[in-house]
Structures are given as structure tokens and as C-alpha cells.
Amino acid sequence: MTINEVQDKIIDEFSMFDDWMDKYSLLIDLGKELPVIDPKFKTKDFLIEGCQSKVWLHPYYDGNKITFTADSDAIITRGIVGLLIKVLSDRTPEEILSADLYFIEKIGLRQNLSPTRSNGLLSMVRQIKLYAMAYDAIKNNL
């Protein structure tokens, strides 16, 4: 599935609910489904700066695609990072860097998060893109 196909699927899932309490429940469920990160990656090196909750993000680059694992000490934040991983994990650095993450606006996520969670969301996206930039530079021997 392409990044846009995954985003469209997420938009469809969230559009089944009118009430944001139901959408928060979906986020919580997504957080519960997030694969467990190896505890050795729950360190300061993988902690995302700018999040109110603790969020750890670990990239694995196989020379072609980046696979992310993550965790958070807050269940809704865990769901948010789970959404980002669903869209951006197992992608090439180029795919990640060129991705237009339109699903964030379409499902109303940014508008329905507290300002601190919204800032955290931006920090997560920024960190994922920074990893992609770094691996893209390595790939292109820059």
C-alpha cells in the first residue's frame, strides 16, 4: 500500500465516528495495538523532544527502508505515534520526505488535540523526517 492509500484508509476509519470521544477511543485502541518497543530503546537517545508525554522513537534502516518502533507513557499519545508509524514505517527515506501527511487535517486530529499534544505531534513528525533525512544522506553518501 502507498502512503496515500494508508492515509485514505485511516481517514475512512475515523470518518465512521462523528463524536470525538469515539475517535479518542479509536486512538486508544491504536495505541494498544502498537507493537512493543525493545526496552533497550527507551532511552534518552530515542526520546522525542517537545512532547509533553514521553515518546520514544527508534528507527531501523536496512539500506533501503526505515522501520520505526515507538512507545509512549500516555495512551492517546501512543495512538498518535501509532498512526504515524502506520503511515510512515517500512518506507524509503525519499517516500517519507516527500509525504504529504494530509490525514492529520482530514481526521481533525490537530484541531482536537490540546496545544501541548499538537506540539508533540509536530515533534514526532519532525523527528521521523529528520531520521529520513539522515538516512537519505547516508544512502547518497553526502
Image (tube, helix red, strand yellow):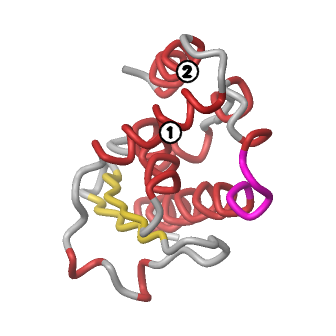
According to the picture, the residue beneath numbered tag 1 turns out to be 95
Q: Which disc number belongs to residue 128?
A: none
Please state the horizontal and vertical placement of residue 86, each as a whole percent of the image: 40, 38
Q: CA distance from mark 1 to mark 2?
A: 24 Å
Density class for disc 2 (Cα within 10 Å; few <14, some 14-19, many ≥20) is: many
Between residue 125 and residue 135, name the one nearer to us.
125
At horizontal 54% and vertical 16% (from top left) the residue drawn is 8
Could you say whether the residue bearing mark 2 is in a helix, strand or loop? Answer: helix
- Depicted 55 relative to depicted 20: above or below: below
Q: Nearer the viewer, mark 1 or mark 2?
A: 2
According to the picture, the residue beneath numbered tag 2 turns out to be 14
Could you say whether the residue bearing mark 1 is in a helix, strand or loop? Answer: helix
Please state the horizontal and vertical placement of residue 115, each as a whole percent of the image: 80, 58
- Left or right relative to 52: residue 1: left
* Main SS of residues in magenta: helix
Instruction: Please give the range of residues in magenta.
Output: 113-118
Density class for disc 1 (Cα within 10 Å; few <14, some 14-19, many ≥20) is: some
Q: How many marks?
A: 2
The amino acid on which the numbered mark 1 sits, given as a three-letter code, is Glu
Give the quadrant of residue 108. Answer: top right
Q: Is residue 100 magenta?
A: no
Q: Is residue 117 magenta?
A: yes
Give the quadrant of residue 33. Answer: top left
- Left or right relative to 113: residue 59: left
- Considering the image in quadrants, where does the N terminus appear? top left
The amino acid on which the numbered mark 2 sits, given as a three-letter code, is Phe
